[in-house]
């Protein structure tokens, strides 16, 4: 207990009540408890166990057949950095609910275990039967952007031929996820750069929501040549600062300080001007 | 007045896309008309980042005349608009904004507001303060920035506090080495205690920069000071504020009277 963060919450939920609620009768309290455990990073073994059990919940169903509790449990497990969750999350990648698969793919990306690669790739190839598409337009068959981003982060170089065709996908957000993953997966810097530059070009998209997505993508890959373009993008300064932080941290990983690289100084000068 | 503004306001009214709205606000800002100030402030709440950037830049260029309207129209219900307005006040650096920035940096619920205000506290137009009030004002700014650097839970707000502290260390007058060493102590502590590597990098940058820049700032300031002491008006002001300063010593830091003094500076400075 003592190494857990000091938890303050208006709802007066404690770790014990959250875990009890998650196993209780009230479906509303259950779905909230799952979110709460992730939000406050409660990574005790009992929390992990009840969240893993919630991934297979059958009680909480939407009219369309969705599994709200499974979605929240998957999101929470993505935040708790416990490897025990990897196998159960791989299992729910074949859930009928699109949003459970999306949440599981994102969680597996943040858990960083390459064991997830075959199943992610299976979904991307459309080899897993019985999955339902997204409810809202454009009613994607699979959460392609989440799958591709996970494969990129998990360094799934063998997946490149399967990912490549999505550069021309009709949905821009999927194209950007693809450029982001190909940047991470391509070993030759001069080839990788073309994917980074593609994302820079996408920063001038007319749609604000898409510009925000691209900012997050560039921050995630820490693409230094994008620094100036990020600073000039028409979007909220908060989001530009978070993206630039991604670039800065990539630079600091190479040159950890206190002496700073020219790139790090350049990024900080841009950040200063956005405060 | 409205004749001059009419075409610009008309274009804003008729804008039918995010881009055309942002272009229309840009045109209004570029016109540089004092009459446009309330409309530029209104544009901060359009929820259109392009328009807001254009409006902030326009307000900052107009400078002093924009300060009172910005303070009066500060939108307490819309934190995005408030963040942009605080950003404008921070960039103008007018002494009348100090009280607002102190409150915003330490207590606003929105991190974008706290961030903009923290940067602004280092960026005040310190030469506009009469010497005796300068001491009080810089001490207040320092205390607020130290609090934010140590306590704020958001990395970006602490980052902004480091930027503010760096600027304050440079602005701090000769003879107030205590403030400067407090800043350097804080920065040194952060190289060990700061959790975010990005904030830590900014601390290293500030340390490096101050090491190079302080001796230069010191040298250039001496020239400036010698020319200032020969003026009669400064002595008069000094006596005037010396009296106020004595009053202050009996008031606690939290006393509203204490802030009222700081606020009165701007009004007195106006021609």
Image: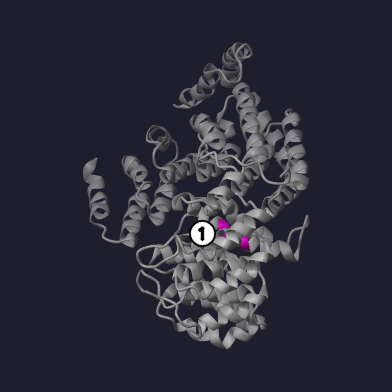
Closest to the observer, B101 or B78: B78
Q: Label 1: few (<14), some or many (≥20) within 10 Å?
A: many
Residue B59 quadrant: top left
Q: Secondary structure at mark 1?
A: helix
Residue B78 quadrant: top left
Q: Position of residue A184 (x, y in %)?
A: 62, 76
Dominant secondary structure of the residues highlighted in magenta in the image: helix
Query: Residue most toward the bottom?
Result: A161
Residue B60 quadrant: top left
Query: Residue most toward the front?
Result: A25
Please say whether residue A141 is visible from this viewpoint.
yes
Label total for image: 1
- Considering only vertical position in the picture, is A226 above or below A269? below
Please say whether residue A263 is visible from this viewpoint.
no
Residue assigned mark 1: A72
Q: Position of residue B169 (x, y in %)?
A: 69, 38
- Location of the C terminus of chain B by quadrant is top left
Q: Residue at x 68, y 60 (%)?
A: A264
Q: Is residue A8 magenta?
A: no
The reply, left or right, for residue B177 in relation to residue B251 is right
The span picked out in magenta is A242-246
Closest to the observer, B77 or B52: B77
- Considering only vertical position in the picture, is B246 above or below B82? above
Closest to the observer, A255 or B55: A255
Output the chain of dot 1: A
Q: Position of residue B53 (x, y in %)?
A: 43, 52
Q: Position of residue B99 (x, y in %)?
A: 52, 29
Closest to the observer, A58 or A224: A58
Q: Residue at x 57, y 35 (%)?
A: B106
């Amino acid at each position: 207990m003592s190494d857990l963060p000091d938890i303050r919450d208006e709802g007066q939920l404690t770790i014990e009540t959250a875990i009890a609620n998650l196993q209780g009768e009230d479906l509303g309290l259950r779905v909230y408890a799952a979110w709460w455990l992730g939000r406050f990073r409660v990574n005790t073994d009992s929390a992990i166990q009840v969240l893993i059990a919630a991934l297979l919940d059958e009680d909480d169903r939407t009219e369309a057949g969705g599994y709200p509790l499974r979605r929240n449990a998957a999101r929470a497990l993505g935040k708790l950095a416990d490897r025990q969750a990897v196998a159960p999350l791989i299992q729910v990648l074949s859930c009928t609910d699109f949003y459970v698969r999306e949440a599981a793919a994102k969680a597996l990306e943040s858990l960083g275990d390459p064991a997830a690669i075959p199943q992610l790739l299976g979904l991307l190839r459309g080899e897993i039967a019985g999955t339902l598409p997204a409810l809202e337009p454009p009613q994607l068959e699979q959460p392609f952007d989440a799958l591709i981003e996970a494969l990129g982060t998990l360094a799934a170089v063998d997946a490149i031929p399967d990912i490549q065709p999505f550069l021309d996908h009709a949905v821009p957000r999927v194209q950007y996820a693809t450029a982001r993953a190909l940047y991470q997966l391509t070993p030759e810097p001069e080839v990788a750069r073309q994917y980074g530059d593609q994302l820079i070009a996408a920063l001038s998209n007319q749609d604000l929501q898409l510009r925000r997505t691209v900012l997050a993508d560039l921050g995630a890959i820490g693409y230094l040549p994008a620094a100036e373009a990020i600073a000039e993008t028409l979007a909220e300064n908060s989001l530009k600062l978070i993206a630039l932080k991604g670039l800065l941290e990539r630079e600091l990983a190479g040159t950890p300080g206190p002496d700073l690289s020219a790139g790090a100084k350049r990024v900080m000068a841009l950040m200063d001007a956005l405060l | 007045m409205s004749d001059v503004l009419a075409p610009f306001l008309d274009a804003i009214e008729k804008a039918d896309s995010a881009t055309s709205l942002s272009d229309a606000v840009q045109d209004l800002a570029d016109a540089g008309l004092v009459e446009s100030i309330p409309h530029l402030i209104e544009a901060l709440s359009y929820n259109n980042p392009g328009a807001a950037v254009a409006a902030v830049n326009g307000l900052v260029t107009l400078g002093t005349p924009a300060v009172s309207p910005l303070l009066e129209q500060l939108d307490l219900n819309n934190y995005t608009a408030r963040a942009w307005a605080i950003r404008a006040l921070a960039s103008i650096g007018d002494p009348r904004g100090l009280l607002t920035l102190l409150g915003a940096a330490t207590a606003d619920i929105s991190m974008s507001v706290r961030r903009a205000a923290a940067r602004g506290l280092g960026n005040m137009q310190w030469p506009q303060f009469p010497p005796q009030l300068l001491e009080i004002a810089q001490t207040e700014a320092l205390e607020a920035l130290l609090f934010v650097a140590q306590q704020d839970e958001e990395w970006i707000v602490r980052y902004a506090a480091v930027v503010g502290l760096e600027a304050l260390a440079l602005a701090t007058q000769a003879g107030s080495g205590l403030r400067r060493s407090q800043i350097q102590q804080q920065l040194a502590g952060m190289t060990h205690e700061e959790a975010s590597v990005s904030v830590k990098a900014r601390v290293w940058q500030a340390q490096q920069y101050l090491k190079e820049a302080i001796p230069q700032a010191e040298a250039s300031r001496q020239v400036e000071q010698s020319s200032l002491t020969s003026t009669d008006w400064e002595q008069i002001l000094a006596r005037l504020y010396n009296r106020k300063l004595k009053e202050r010593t009996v008031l606690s830091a939290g006393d509203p009277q204490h802030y009222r003094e700081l606020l009165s500076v701007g009004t007195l400075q106006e021609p």
